[in-house]
């Protein structure tokens, strides 16, 4: 009997230890989708979704229900009721939630996997499930191409094309990692590997080092003494997230993680470090051009070093700079190595003065629990303070965006009172009163100018009426001309994995932004602006702002990714607004008014 009790307690302890907050969030998300699919109470659907969002925003794994309660209370996070607490505790103790199990008996799992795809949703799938008995993606695609679907009310050509496009975007997002996801994974792996004292150098490589918007596989490069190489490979293989080792040799080990993403680790000797880093960073186009230039000068370049063609003598490779220096070039930053003009500049000894993370002094775009954020105002402020910012803009949604709990004038004034109170505790960082005001279909804003005048900083964004029939270029240009609007939020409407950008004449928008002294936003979680658009904006004299558009305190750390994206777009420091001092930002706002 006693042994049985002890065994049960041991099993419970193990489950507590293994429980992942993200796993619990996923279950609540699936319950929300399932409940909507089954037509359950709307309040219950919203409750499940709210809990999923809150848990997704918690950066650490909760091992104890009391620990969760303390965390929620300490960070002033509301929205997880007693019933949800009981379900979370059930998972922590048993590794499952009976309610979730019940949903899976009623909702086909393969449909559940695609319910969150853009343009689809639970209600659409339920209609097709009832009409045609579809149970997976293959069934859905067959029905979409059938004549019978057109007999269903509401399923015209436009609706069908939107579903197909949504599935395509969804599949693309599954095949490639978005840069923020890849960055988090890579940093965790690097932290793990750094515990090996045998490692001399370590870096990410490949497209992630070049800060591409999407990543196929994560590449990590390490240098170590030859006798230490096997130990490093073995250490990598037992990383906690490794599901399967798919290949391992003297220099390279490839693994699949539990999330089905591939990571390749290459280990080279110290004298090869620089040449290997240059080679495995790429891009292919950049490297081919470098090899051609080297060959013309009598050199051969490879991942093993740079060599004299005639004598085969090794001339360098310990440092990355060696490769470029020997062929009379300066080293271009990794982010712009795409053979799009960087080589020609490097041959002239020119390196663009690209923005650095250390240049960033604040963040202009973030949300709190006042609208659709998952963290309290105080929590967002405290996190920004710890990041060393000199100023931030609290920019919750405005009243037209009801789905995001947008604020009206009365609620903004309530928020301002809290900002004033919290500001007294953070004297070294200024909290600016801001908003993300909605751009209406006709280009008007959903707050009056007389009220916008009371804000310190105003972002204006399009969140609806994005069809090809709407002149979005005209809407944005009209808003740029409003003297109280300081920034255009996610200008092209792009949201990776969910939506392509709307039809927009970016040249006209950049021109209007420059003429009206309005910043264009590089929105990190949406990857909007693109590198091409950033480069066009900067070369034509427009200011950009790099923003996290954070809906959780954990998202605020993505500023480093944003700087990488900006550098990829050749963003110069003097054209990035949040490299400016608070005094300069206030001058920027005042000059327009």
Image: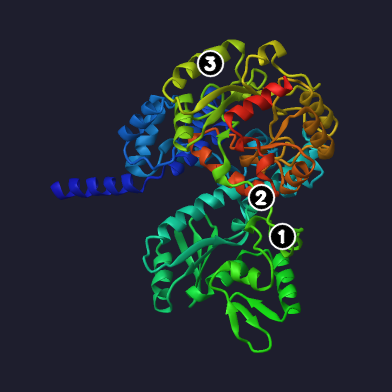
Q: Residues within 10 Å of mark 2 (few under 14, many from 20)?
A: few
Residue annotated with mark 1: 338
Q: Position of residue 527 (x, y in %)?
A: 66, 43
Rendered image quadrant of residue 394: top right
Residue annotated with mark 3: 416
Q: Residues within 10 Å of mark 3 (few under 14, many from 20)?
A: some
Question: Mark 1 and 2 residues: CB-CB less than 8 Å, in contact?
Answer: no
Rendered image quadrant of residue 425: top left
Q: Position of residue 491 (x, y in %)?
A: 73, 35
Rendered image quadrant of residue 500: top right
Mark 3 vs mark 2, foreground winner is 2
Q: Quadrant of the C terminus?
A: top right
Residue annotated with mark 2: 353
For the residue labelled by badge 1, is the local secondary structure a helix, a strand or a loop?
Answer: loop
Is residue 92 found left or right of 476 in the rendered image?
Answer: left
Is residue 431 in sight in this rendering? yes
């Amino acid at each position: 009997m006693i042994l049985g009790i002890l065994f049960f307690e041991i099993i419970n302890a193990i489950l507590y230890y293994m429980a992942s907050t993200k796993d619990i969030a996923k279950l609540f998300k699936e319950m929300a989708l399932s409940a909507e699919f089954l037509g359950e109470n709307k309040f219950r659907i919203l409750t499940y979704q709210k809990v999923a969002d809150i848990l997704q925003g918690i950066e650490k794994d909760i091992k104890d229900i009391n620990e969760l309660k303390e965390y929620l209370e300490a960070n002033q996070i509301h929205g997880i009721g007693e019933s949800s607490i009981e379900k979370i505790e059930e998972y922590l103790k048993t590794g499952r939630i009976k309610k979730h199990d019940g949903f899976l008996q009623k909702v086909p799992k393969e449909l559940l996997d695609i319910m969150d795809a853009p343009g689809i949703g639970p209600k659409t799938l339920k209609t097709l499930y009832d009409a045609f008995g579809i149970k997976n993606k293959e069934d859905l695609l067959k029905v979409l191409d059938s004549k019978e679907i057109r007999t269903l009310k509401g399923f015209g050509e436009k609706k069908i094309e939107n579903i197909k496009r949504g599935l395509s975007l969804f599949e693309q997002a599954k095949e490639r990692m978005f840069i923020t996801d890849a960055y988090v994974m890579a940093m965790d792996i690097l932290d793990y590997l750094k515990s090996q004292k045998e490692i001399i150098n370590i870096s990410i490589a490949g497209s992630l080092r070049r800060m591409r918007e999407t990543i196929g596989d994560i590449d990590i490069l390490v240098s170590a003494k030859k006798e230490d190489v096997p130990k490093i490979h073995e250490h990598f293989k037992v990383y906690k997230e490794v599901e399967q080792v798919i290949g391992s040799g003297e220099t390279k080990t490839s693994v699949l993680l539990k999330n089905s993403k591939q990571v390749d680790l290459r280990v080279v000797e110290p004298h090869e470090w620089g040449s290997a880093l240059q080679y495995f960073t790429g891009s292919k186009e950049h490297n081919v051009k470098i090899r051609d230039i080297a060959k013309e000068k009598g050199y051969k370049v490879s991942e093993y070093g740079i060599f004299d063609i005639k004598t085969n003598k090794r001339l360098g490779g310990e440092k990355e700079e060696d490769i470029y220096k020997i062929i009379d070039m300066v080293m271009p930053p990794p982010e712009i190595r795409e053979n799009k003009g960087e080589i020609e500049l490097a041959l002239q000894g020119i390196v663009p003065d690209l923005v650095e993370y250390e240049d960033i002094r604040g963040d202009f775009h973030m949300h709190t629990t006042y609208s659709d954020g998952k963290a309290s105002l105080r929590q967002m402020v405290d996190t920004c303070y710890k990041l060393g910012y000199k100023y931030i803009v609290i920019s919750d949604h405005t009243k037209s965006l009801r789905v995001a709990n947008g604020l009206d004038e009365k609620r903004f004034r309530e928020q301002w009172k809290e900002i004033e109170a919290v500001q007294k505790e953070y004297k070294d960082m200024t909290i600016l009163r801001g908003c993300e005001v909605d751009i209406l279909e006709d280009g008007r804003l959903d707050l009056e100018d007389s009220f916008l005048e009371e804000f310190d900083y105003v972002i204006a964004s399009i969140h609806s009426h994005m069809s090809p029939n709407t002149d979005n270029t005209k809407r944005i240009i009209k808003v740029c001309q409003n003297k109280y609007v300081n920034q255009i939020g996610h200008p092209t409407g792009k949201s990776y994995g969910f939506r392509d950008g709307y039809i927009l004449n970016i040249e006209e928008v950049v021109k209007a932004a420059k003429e009206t002294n309005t910043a264009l936003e590089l929105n990190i979680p949406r990857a909007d602006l693109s590198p091409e658009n950033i480069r066009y904006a900067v070369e034509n004299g427009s200011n950009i702002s790099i923003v996290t558009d954070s809906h959780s305190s954990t998202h605020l750390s993505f500023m480093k990714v944003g700087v990488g994206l900006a550098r990829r777009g050749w963003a110069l420091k003097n054209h990035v607004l949040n490299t400016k001092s608070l005094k300069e930002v206030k001058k920027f706002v005042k000059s327009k008014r």
